[in-house]
Image: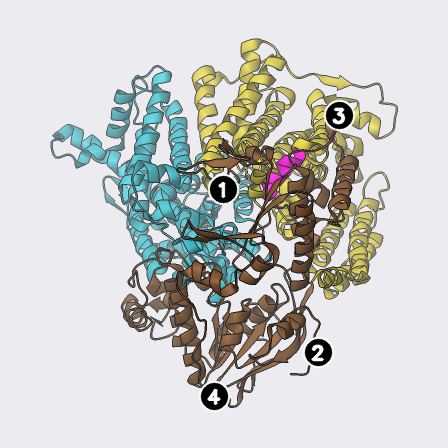
Amino acid sequence: MSEGEGQASLTVASRLSGYLRGGGVIAPLLTALIAFFVGGLVIAVTGANPFSTYKAIFDGSGLNWLFPWISHDDRTTAALNLQQTLITMTPLLLAGLAVAYAFRAGLFNIGGQGQYFAGLYIGVWVGSSLHGLPGFLHIVLALVLGTLAGAVWGGIAGFLKATTGANEVISTIMLNYVALWVGVWAFGLGGPLHSDHDPNVPISNPVVKNARLPVFWGDPELQGLHVGIFLAGVAMIVFWVLLNRSVAGYEARAVGFNPDAAEYGGIHAGRTYTKVMLVCGAFAGLAGVIDILGWQFAVATNDIQNAGVVGAGFIGIAVALLGRNTMVGVFFSALLFGALINGTSVRNLDPAVFPPELATNLTLIIQGLIVLLVSAPVIVTALYKLRPRRTRPNEDAPA
Amino acid sequence: MSTAVTARRLDPTSVERPVLAGWGGIVLALLGLWLTLPPVLVRTPLPSLVLAAVAAGLGVWVVREGQRRLGWGAVVVAVLCAVGAVAATRSGQGNLERVIVWSALAAAMLRFATPLVFAALGGVISERSGVVNIGLEGMMLVGAFFGIYGTDLTGTWIGGLLIGMIAGGLLGLLHAVFAVSLRADQIVSGFAINFIALGLTGYIFLHHYGDQGTPEGLPQVPDISLPIDWIPFFGPALDRLNLLVWVALILVFLVWLFVFRTPAGLRLRSVGENPRAAATVGISVYRTRYLAVIASGMLAAMGGAFLSIGFVHSFSQNMTAGRGFIALAVVIVGKWRPVAALAAALMFGFSQALAQRLPVFSESSATLLQALPYVVTLIAVAGLVGRSTPPAADGVPYSKE
Amino acid sequence: MSVLYGLYRPDEGELLLDGRPVAIESPRQAIELGIGMVHQHFMLVPVMTVAENIVLASEPRKGLLLDTKAAARRVRELSDRFGLSVDPDARVGDISVGQQQRVEILRALDRGAEVLILDEPTAVLTAQETAELFKILRTLTAEGKSIVFISHKLGEVLEISDRVSVLRRGKKIETVPTEGATEESLARMMVGRDVLFRVAKEPTEPGAPLLEVEDLEVTDDRGLPAVRGLSLQVRAGEIVGIAGVDDNGQGELVETIAGLRRATAGVIRVDGRDVTAADVRGKLEAGIGHIAEDRQRRGLVLDFSLAENLCLRDYRRPPIAKRGLISPKRMNERAALLLDEYDVRGGSCESLALSLSGGNQQKVVIAREISEDPKVLVAAQPTRGLDVGAIEFVHRRLLEQRDAGRGVLLVSLELEEIRSLSDRVLVMYDGRVVAELGPEASEEEFGVAMLGGGQREQV
């Protein structure tokens, strides 16, 4: 009868922990299935055939490359498509890590997009200047500075929360828009980083050939798969070690589950928030640099404005939540979303089956449904009978 | 025990003077800036700088006295005003007179503030019931799309407005199902609402209108012409505003009346403060929260509809561009009170109005100024959030057991 | 009683009201049937006024609007009629706990309650407030109201009731007239056997002062003074108890000693070293162990494993962590030893803290704090919400610490606990120590001191 107060101090992390912990792979799979089912209904309402649409999206993603029975010609196409899917997946994976790490500390990082922009901008700036620098050095410099830029942009939100208590949800959203407009201004006509060669197109200078990430699978001229995906792999390992084996990660998780108990353990919640957001920003910033050094090579202001709505940083939220904020989960859900986005791209989706411009919005709906379903652990628990986890004895039941 | 409590609460007047000084400093700094602007147009920054220095000094003193937030606020305002004053005295008088037309700025401020006011009122009602509604952005967006789509279907803006509000209400219902019945994490489910709204409106918009965009010449919410243009300042500011601008202002009053002066408002607040207490006197927490969130969706949708059929007269994907999030900030800065929220919305509206008029100086820097409202939001939330206390049960799912 | 009030539905059985069977499905229906309830945790909205709280859900109207004047009038009429004085326009958050309880009672009466259920109504009251409450209850019964008074304080039950029903594990054991019943006879019915609450305790000779607090001043969350010039000393090998009614600054005092809150004035010394300005980590390193008042909120991270919880205090130091990385092997090894040594049941290193019972959770907390080898152990309400077995365990451990030559500062609202464990007892009232008593002092002496009636003594 005595301890009824605990409720209010529950954090996002602890409220979602039922979902995050329970259910193994089945809960996220079911979540995705339901979302795709509802997406199928939307397709059907529009008059297209959901099955052939999803089949076309699947083939467009190149995931059929994994099937051994795919024949020679199809295989070549599939390989090309799969390369694109993996290129798309790389920033999603990193952005997913950026959101997931924050979630584990009880923070909702909606600012992945802004942090991505920060990495993108610094990446293109460094990559397009400093001509004559040796390639490897140039790449490393761009990667490091871009990652740092993302970290700073994320750290601002953490610092504001630590010092003034400003809610990170609102501050990260605002920082997204600030980053967006700074980019539109900087690379737009008359902006300080506007192209030297194209006076009438709002675009940046291109990244010099030397500073581009090497392609290891496919034709560099046809946008083959660059080594960025390995960097993302390294980031995954860093994420895991940081979270599960490091003092900083212990502090982050303690604050995420219970800030009061963390304080009692001598952990400063504020400092932890700042550190966590620095790390998150670094992940998202890295995503930005990899995109610019890997395949975009130049920043156009239209792309910035589009990404401000459906960019990797936003999709990272769905990626993290579906992936239950774990390393492996984020990997697979990034693959899923990468496949979905690439499979619905104008280049890959046959307009006769389903109009690709609608498909982008379909992807958004599916994302929204996934996030919605994840928000209520009750649903997951009901779908997949979890072991009763909150077995507190009566004496401590909230009054 | 009781005497101890009252004795502790009676804190003497020591707080008063720094507070006065802090606000006084802010007023002085603003006065200094005002001197350099039309119609006064002092062409030297000296008096403004002196005033700003005094303000900053007061701010530092206030910080020393323990009112840190207010003190730093005064210092920041002083610095900004000093910079503004220098910039103003350096720029051409003609440009200044073109940009700073107070009545036009006021009219634009009202126009930009209106969608925020609608959405913020929705936020106030929802959060007063204990449900954080971060889905305001999405609800505005469906209001904007279905407002114009409905106008297209029914041929009248009234039909459009109603259909838009119904769409917003339905999205509110969806949020309520998750936030209330399924006890979802409200921030996450609210954010999902935004994704869904973005995808859904984009989907139907492209499916229905394709590349053409919404048709021209659809009926619009009419402007209200008032025969008051002979009154200085107020005349030109208020004589031709959209009907929905006035509706928003009236709604501020009505929502205030509802929340603080009616039995239903009392119940709403009790649910948001202590749902268990409300339940024990027989108030249905679920029903109250459902109604509040649905109402919040409808209000936000009105704000969106104003954008599409009252202001811009067309729809484009993601046209709300974060206004729903700014409205959330408005709710916080406005301390969950309708009238204070109006004041906060006007501040954001002013920053947008200013950003819109500043391109006179430089085309390219004007783009940068598009970020102004977001920066203002950031500063406001960082500067004020510590002082405002949300309803006690805001964001906490309620379970009957 | 939650069933009576319609918060829960009964699984079987029926309720009779005035001899007729009724089904109560909601609080609203209970209210209509004339059942009023005063909850242990008050069901009030602190930011609203007394009048608003009382009329909530049956508001007087003026047109569409709330008639605040009529509401205040109604409250005044009620309070005059039953002799419960309250200020209708005061904010509930600003009035005392005793007055808040009156608001609850008035609200039930406002709804025409004939049967009034009071759930542990005196738990939060001072003796004086309790006496006032009893006066009110007698007035009400004189008016013909029926009262169900739920309490585990036998003395109060005997004082106020006409008949007593003893419940044990959801079953009624017996109903007896109060006349003729004694505390012992009721206690026997409650536990099913004779109980004797005594802790075997060897007298010790206290040594040098380990914890010294001088003229400490601390403010609460609202910035109002909570601890006002308090001084105390805990010497090696003694348990110093702090008695007092809840919310007289004990929480703030403990948090300040533990480093969770900053002192605004005064000095805290541990073993002669000034640690006033130290934060949690500094206080810990100086030798302060802290069994937090709320183990679920403060003491444990419920979603962490037991091993992770056991290193909450030293996760960043060797042997647990080296060069910023935590070794799960060393963490688990040590946890296994501690779990074994402190007899924590129902979980291993990997189990989550939330899967344990309250008693075992508390064992984890105690294991962690003692394993840090503190000089002084500050125990705040260490047995709150625990069953008898766990209470015994905690008490035994605290005595062990004392006998091992550590200082123990025990803060508890349970006077019995304080008296049976402590070597000296300080009584706190309104942020000050108002009396120092031996544990053998009479209940009356304690009662007077806890109400601030005692002479202030220099400790």
Do badges 4 and 1 share one subunit?
no
Q: Indicate which label's residue lies in the foreground, 3 or 1.
A: 3
| C359 left or right, relative to B170 | left
Q: Looking at the image, tell me whether mark 3 or mark 2 is earlier in sequence order.
A: 3
Above or below — where is A365 with respect to B30? above
Shade of chain B as shown in the rendered figure: yellow
- Which mark identifies residue C194? none
Which residue is identified by label 4?
C204
Find residue C248 and report its horizontal and vertical position in percent: 64, 66
Instruction: Identify which residue, C116 or B91, lies in the foreground.
Output: C116
Shade of chain A as shown in the rendered figure: cyan
Q: Looking at the image, tell me whether mark 4 or mark 3 is earlier in sequence order.
A: 3
Examine the image and state in which quarter residue B123 appears.
top right
- Mark 1 — on which chain does it sit? B
Q: Give the residues drawn in magenta, as a range.
A: B265-274
Residue under the image location 31 percent in, 50 percent down: A327
Is residue B56 visible in the rendered structure shown here? yes
The amino acid type, in three-letter code, at marker 3 is Gly
Q: Label 4 vs label 1: CA separation? A: 52 Å
The brown-tinted chain is C
- Mark 2 — on which chain does it sit? C
Residue under the image location 30 percent in, 56 percent down: A237
